[in-house]
Image (cartoon, rainbow, N blue to C red):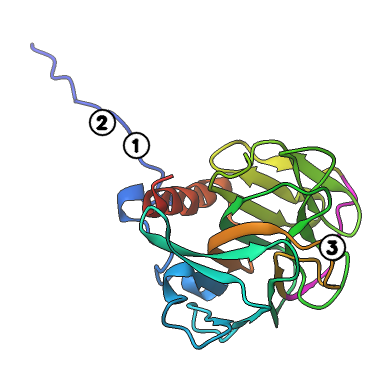
Amino acid sequence: MLLTLKKKPLYKKHKFVPAFGTFTPFDATLVPNTIALYDGDTLALDPINTWSDSSGNGNTLTLVNGPTLQVAAINGHDALRFDGINQYAQSLTPVCLQPYIIYVVLKQITWVNGAVMIDDGITNNISYFRNLVGTPQVRWSGSGNEVFSSQLIVNTYNICTLLGNGNNSALRIGLNSAIVTTPGWGTNTRNGITIAAKVNLANFHNCEITYIIYRNVADPTFLQNNFINWLKTRFAI
């Protein structure tokens, strides 16, 4: 009697992981957790001195002291440039409990010790993303400990993933492995967002930013990878 061998599939997809080619951050299952989204390609159409929130939640950024539109700054996409002197953007909303995650596509044009790229919108020392110690090092800080990376090369666009989740908070640059914080990072609620400065209007940063996705959830690694790959493809980086 002849034995019939059944063919096994060459691979098995995890049922929760969408194939990257079909992924979009605007999927109906993802949108409810996206509380703000800032797309540089809307800047040319936005009212003067504003950056609209494309999530539909109305968390519009106010642009202060004239950060400048950079047309086709990154592979055909527009960005906003901050001079590192007195320019910044700010929204006092949304209010966001931990956990949360922020994906930001940016380039630090110059590196200055202590300069801040992302901060809270109302209160000092809640959580902020800044330069610290030596070029090109960046640090993601809570109200306590900090986690740092030297992977964000100066004058080069990359995708930064900032996870605020207490002792499980983490920083990722591109698709590199997450650098997870040590205990004591902080558990504070975020209120709004400040870009290119500390919330007390100090430590201004000279940078360009083209895209921000702000979500009130701790995306697992596979989903982070989908967001990052989507951004890498969109901006060809």
Q: Is residue 128 left or right of residue 223?
A: right
Q: Earlier in the sequence, mark 2 or mark 3?
A: 2
Q: Nearer the viewer, residue 1 or 143?
A: 143
Image position of 183 with respect to 120: above or below: above
Mark 1 or 3, closer to the camera: 3
Question: For the point 76% across and 49% down, which residue is it?
Answer: 168
Count of marks, rendered view? 3
Residue 196 percent across, percent down from the top left: 70, 64
Magenta stretch encompasses residue 48: no
In the rendered image, which residue does mark 2 sit on?
9
Q: The residue tagged with tag 3: helix, strand or loop? A: loop
In the rendered image, which residue does mark 3 sit on?
187
Mark 1, Cα crowd under 10 Å, few <14 / some 14-19 / many 20+, is few
Q: Chief secondary structure of the magenta span?
A: loop
Question: For the point 64% across and 60% down, which residue is it?
Answer: 101
Q: Nearer the viewer, residue 118 or 203?
A: 203
First to last magenta residue range: 183-192
Q: Are marks 1 and 2 in contact (CB under 8 Å)?
A: yes
Residue 45 percent across, percent down from the top left: 41, 82
Image position of 192 with respect to 140: above or below: below
In the rendered image, which residue does mark 1 sit on?
12
